[in-house]
Amino acid sequence: MIMDLLEHGHLLTASELAQAAQEARHFAELSQQEAARRLGVAQATLAQAESAPKRSLQALRTRMVAELSAGMEVSGPYFVVKRRGMSLRDGDYFR
């Protein structure tokens, strides 16, 4: 589960953030309709935030993780900029 990774802080892709948002809703034991009402958005918008990571709904996803999970905090967005063809080693993200 993505939420398990977040205990120690990790950079997430848009797809992983969408999965974390869905996991946060499940953790809160809320249906999509209940979570949408609580967050003040339409159920269809919330469903897209969970299932369509290419859509620009990062703000809603970060709110879902922050507000529906137990004590998680989301900072971002983060993007890794590197030279083409260059691979990153562990720790390179934070230098």
Image: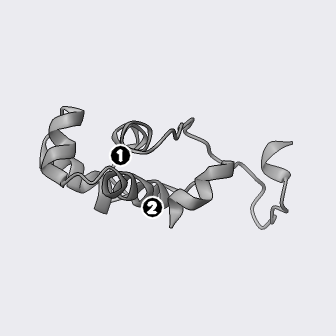
- Which label number is shown at residue 72? none
| Tags 2 and 1 touching, CB below 8 Å | no
**Callout 2: SS:** helix
Name the residue: 44% across, 56% down: 20
87 left or right, relative to 29:
right
Please count the marks in the image: 2
Classify 10 Å Cα crowding around label 1: few (below 14), some (14-19), many (20 and above): few
> As displayed, is residue 85 above or below residue 5?
below
50 left or right, relative to 79:
left
User: Residue 62, how many percent across, how many down?
Assistant: 43, 40
16 left or right, relative to 87:
left
**Callout 1: SS:** loop
**Which quadrant holds residue 37?**
top left
Name the residue: 56% across, 37% down: 76
Q: Which residue is mark 2?
A: 15
- Which label number is shown at residue 56? 1
Name the residue: 18% across, 53% down: 32
